[in-house]
Image: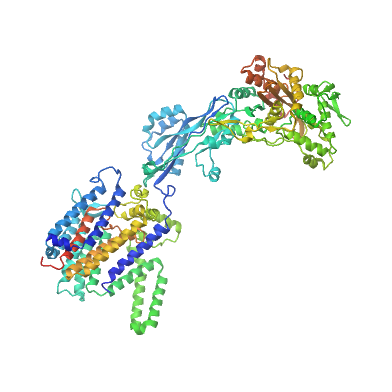
Amino acid sequence: MIGSGLRRMDWISVLFCCALIGFGWGNIYSSTVVDTDAPLWNLSTSYGKQLVFITISFFTVVVLFLLQTKLIERFSSLVYLLTIILLIGLFPFGKTIAGATSWYGLGFFNLQPSELAKIGTILALGKYLSDIQTDLKRFKHQFYALLIILVPVILIVPQPDPGSALIFFSLVFILFREGVSLKYFWIGLYFILLFISTLKFNLIYVGVGISLISMVSYFFFNKRLKLKWTGIAVFIILSLGFASSVQYVFENVFEQRHRDRFSLWLNLEKDPLIQEQIKKTIGYNTYQSEKAIEAGGFWGKGFLEGTRTKGDFVPEQHTDYIFSTVGEEWGFVGTFTVILLFTALLLRLLYLAERQTSTFNRVYGYGVVSILATHYIINIGMVIGLLPTVGVPLPFFSYGGSGLLGFCLLLFIFIKLDANRLNEWD
Amino acid sequence: MKKLILPLLIIAIGVLFTYRLINLQLIGSVGDGPGQDPAIKTTTIYPTRGLMYDRNHKLLVSNQPAYDLMVIPREIKDLDTLELCQLVDIDKEQFIQSIEKAKRYSPRLPSVLVSKLSASTYAVLQEKMRKFEGFYIQKINLRKYHTDAGANLLGYISEVNDYEIQNNPGYISGELIGRTGVEKQYESNLRGKKGKNYIQKDRFNRTIGPYKNGIYDSVPVPGTNLELTIDKDLQEYGEDLMIGKRGGIVALEPKTGEILSLITGPNYDPALLVGRERSANYTALYYDSIAKPTWNRALLAQPSPGSPFKILNALAALEEGVITSNSKVMCYNGFYVGNELKGCHCGGGIRDLREGIAVSCNAYFADTFKKIYAKFDKTSEGQDVWERHMKSFGLGDYLGYDLPTGAPGRIPSTSYYDRAYGKNRWFPTFIISNSIGQGEVAATPIQLANMTAAIANKGFFYTPHILRKIGDDPITDPNFTEAKLTTISKKHFTPIIEAMRDVYETGTAKWIQIPGVSIAGKTGTVENYTLIDGVKTQLTDHSLFIAFAPVEDPKIALAVYIEHGYFGARYAGHIASLMIEKYLKGEISRKDLERKMLEKTLEKEYAKPLSGEPFEINEYDW
């Protein structure tokens, strides 16, 4: 059973994953090592702990492969329920680290149930969507599907852990794949862009822009697109209404720290001196990580040679900002390799998902890709200064035991599903 | 479309990230040398400055450790302010002010709180340092002088200023640089090479350890020791003799041009410009505009050379063939210029060259001077020839010695008089004062000493210099090691030197002979004037003396210039005589004479023009 499972396992994805874990550990080592002569298996150091978790993850995956594949689908609802209970349990029993009550203290390590909730939610979605009676064209079923996603989000937001909550939203990509109209996607994208451009430019420019585009489309494409002027009018009014509320939401609903992040990201401050000041205070992390990455140049400074890494100039460098270590010590060669590895892994997983015969497997595959891709985009986007600061780890790469274990389970459940896609009776 | 949206998104993001990384790492990257990288702090280790020895390898200048009390303001904890203030001997307000100043500079970086603590303060303080968190002691190197003489020639060092840092990237703030004298002239040798330590810091500016285990670090190279030409004992003795007098003494070794001593009076102890009182002492010395202790009279004073200059005129006349050693002149207790009688102290009568020099007869040299010009059709031709002869003795222009200050003196040229009187409208009688070293000629004491050395050598000199060896290597600069010829033939010096010996045997300096030493010399008594309330007023004559000894094998040639010392044979002559004896014999046999010169001062004379009262000049007072 194991033999056939191993043979059918998708070794390409495994290889990419192992490469990321290995390279990631090297960078954690470089970011946290104090004495290079000390033994690697040292539980008082971050790299030592991470090594332990890599081993634990390995054995967990082995155990996973010993289980019957069908158990996964069978118990998916139960897993979901269990993770929801764990999330609820955080309220009375959770351990607070850095202001967020997101962990259970288990002595030698802290368990973050939201990592498990990701798996549970995807499993539950798979179960629900593979039900023969579910029809995503129907609004009610769309709503139920969304509810499965929203329940953990609602429980995670007050921890507060907005980063993780944001990750769950990416699961809507599964719904688009499974039949929910892409219109929602485009509309959502449109409003996000509208929000950003209203902040960046201003209401009047945005209003004029929308009106112009609408009129141009009406006059030139109205035959082909069969546009009605009433529809256009509704579109303009809606857009303008949304745009004019942006400023209010930004000023009154957002908190100062959110405003600062947006201000930093979109260069909202006009005075270059104040902007530079913001960069060095509120944007300290990003500023330092950009500097460290810049300092790496093409070839980088070499393993263990990153002076900014050694000097701890980038806070949280072994966790969320691990990518800046890659940038400083391995240069463009290293960063580009990481981008390539992630892109290749994600595309490979998508290819695997598409070749699944069962809806459950496919949904799960899409879920894995959505979760991993969102982590990867938000994390690296933040570290290289393209996105505002949101604290999510880089999968397989960042330091963090329960994170690594969570990602490994997430991925290898899918690899196990894929390996057994043809003999589901097994 | 629904299958494509995620792959497209992932690829697009990959491209976007790559684009951003290209911008950051390939286009925006400036590299991260120790200069830009905030994680690497460079600390400089200062080399010890080169030592200075005298010609007999006696130590003149070395280094002494001093201790700065440093503070890192934010690391101060539970401070007993009063105790610390008592230990370093400053008052509390000043202490608090200094701390505030340090805080303003940086709470994280060290600042100097009290500079240059003495070794004894340091000894006490160091015992208790652990009590004062946030403070530490930094060792620095200061100069230590093993002599109280030579301040003006040794020079001093002080911290570089902003201007120097801007113009010379080799210096950094806080570094020391030579300001005057040898310290300035041979800065590049004395300075040595700084060492660097690269230290890895974290973002709180805390030290983690050496950067890359110190592979880029460099050790400082200590400065090169210098051996000077100065004779320490002679220098100190000369400065003692100058107490209460203003002027300069320059003693040279004629065979080499080495400066045996270079004395200016008044002088000061070089140790005054070291340590905590440096600033106050310097201000006091620098702003003493009456005695001008920082103004090196041996190099910068440009009096008329007076009678010693007669020797050069005699040599020029001999060379031009207009007189012989037997030429005689009648002195009428003076000489006539037109119908005007100019005075002479020699006693009158028929003088030949030897007598003329020995008794310093003005009439003889006025006549000799006119004879030089009479050889030529035009006065200007005579002037050009005369000027060439005079300048070949190193007069009338910067001498080219290796000290950073100097003055050219003056040997007037044809164009000089053309400007004054109009072209071809001046005659030897106009400039007859030059014959006796008054008039337009002027020379610094070191030029006079050099001229004396040239006479002692019978026609050549080595440019005076103060440096003998760099490390263990003798100097090789051809400017100092190659002889410079005068325009006068060797044979003409013999009668002149005989005459100069007579100055001591029978002439103006017969009172100051040294038993057993043959000296050739020449006195000078120089009239001089100043402006008092806009009125040109004559002051007591300057006393001047040049001499070399022993005559047979000259080992020392010197010029002594004493402001307002009256007759050349008095102050200058006595001092010259003592200096020669000291150098040649090592001790003084004429104790009375020595005591007299050590004790006598001219302060009363110097006070006269400033008193605002009418005063007598050239009083006997001896």
Q: On the rendered structure, is B381 left or right of A355?
A: right
Colour option used: rainbow
In the rendered view, tell whether residue A383 sits above or below residue B136: below
Quadrant holding the N terminus of chain B: bottom left
- The residue that appears at 60% across and 23% down in the rendered structure is B236
Q: Nearer the viewer, residue B19 or A251?
A: B19
Quadrant holding the C terminus of chain B: top right
The spot of residue B609 in percent (x, y) is 72, 29
Q: On the rendered structure, is A256 left or right of A105?
A: right
Q: On the rendered structure, is B585 left or right of A161?
A: right
Q: Quadrant of residue A150?
A: bottom left
The spot of residue A60 in percent (x, y) is 16, 55
Q: Nearer the viewer, residue B304 or A225?
A: B304
- Which residue in the rendered view is the most extreme toward the left? A425
Q: On the rendered structure, is A90 left or right of B225?
A: left
Q: Quadrant of residue A331?
A: bottom left
Q: Is residue A200 visible?
A: yes
- Which residue in the rendered view is the most extreme toward the right? B339
Q: Nearer the viewer, residue A388 or B43?
A: B43
Count of number-bearing discs: 0
Q: Quadrant of residue B481?
A: top right
Q: Is residue B290 visible?
A: no
In the rendered view, tell whether residue A154 sits above or below residue B433: below
The spot of residue B42 in percent (x, y) is 43, 43
The spot of residue B440 in percent (x, y) is 76, 35
Q: Nearer the viewer, residue B615 or B43?
A: B43
